[in-house]
Image (cartoon, rainbow, N blue to C red):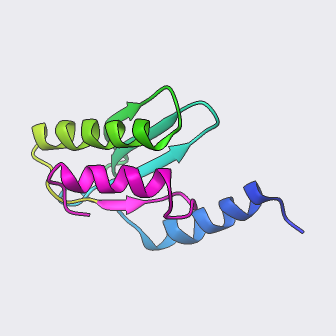
Amino acid sequence: MKSRQAQRIVRKRRIRAKIIGSAARPRLAFYRSSRALVAQVIDDAKGRTILGKRTNGTNTAVAQTLGQDVAKAAGAKKITTMVFDRSGYRYHGVVAAFVDAVRSGGITI
């Protein structure tokens, strides 16, 4: 049986095969480690990271502040719509809090 991490990588690859970011609608990639949460806005057509944010801490309150920061920074760069890449994580808890905060900041996902 595969480990949880290996199962997440399989899910991540399956999701990435279907999600593509562009300049008009970039990909919002989310990563969760044991110490930090990381979010990047990526234009896959050019292979460029438009913006990136990182936090210290992994709880839902930190995820909400990260989502608000990403929404502000994306709004400053005139980005209004994004495609969310959950990187194989369940859409629950920290991931859901992050996306809800981004949506409340005025970004359409």
Which residue is at 85% across, 65% downward?
Answer: 2
Residue 44 is at least partly visible in this image: no
Q: Nearer the viewer, residue 82 or 68?
A: 68
User: For the view shown, which residue lies furthest in the top direction?
Assistant: 56
Q: How many marks?
A: 0
Residue 83 is at least partly visible in this image: yes
Which residue is at 50% across, 62% downward?
Answer: 92
Query: Above or below — where is 57 with respect to 50?
Result: above
User: For the view shown, which residue lies furthest in the right direction?
Assistant: 1
Q: Is residue 80 left or right of residue 21?
A: left
Place of residue 86 in the rendered image (x, y in percent of width and height, measured from the top left): 48, 59
The region drawn magenta spans 83-109
Q: Is residue 73 magenta?
A: no
Q: Nearer the viewer, residue 98 or 4?
A: 98
Place of residue 31 in the rendered image (x, y in percent of width and height, measured from the top left): 52, 45
Place of residue 48 in the rendered image (x, y in percent of width and height, measured from the top left): 34, 42
Q: Is residue 4 left or right of residue 83?
A: right
Query: Above or below — where is 23 with respect to 59?
Result: below
Place of residue 55 in the rendered image (x, y in percent of width and height, measured from the top left): 44, 29
Q: Is residue 91 magenta?
A: yes
Which residue is at 52% across, 69% downward?
Answer: 15
On the rendered image, what quadrant is the C terminus found in? bottom left
Which residue is at 29% across, 49% downward?
Answer: 101
Q: Nearer the viewer, residue 53 or 61?
A: 61
Q: Nearer the viewer, residue 55 or 40?
A: 55
Instruction: Write down the quadrant of residue 25 in the picture.
Output: bottom left
On the rendered image, what quadrant is the N terminus found in? bottom right
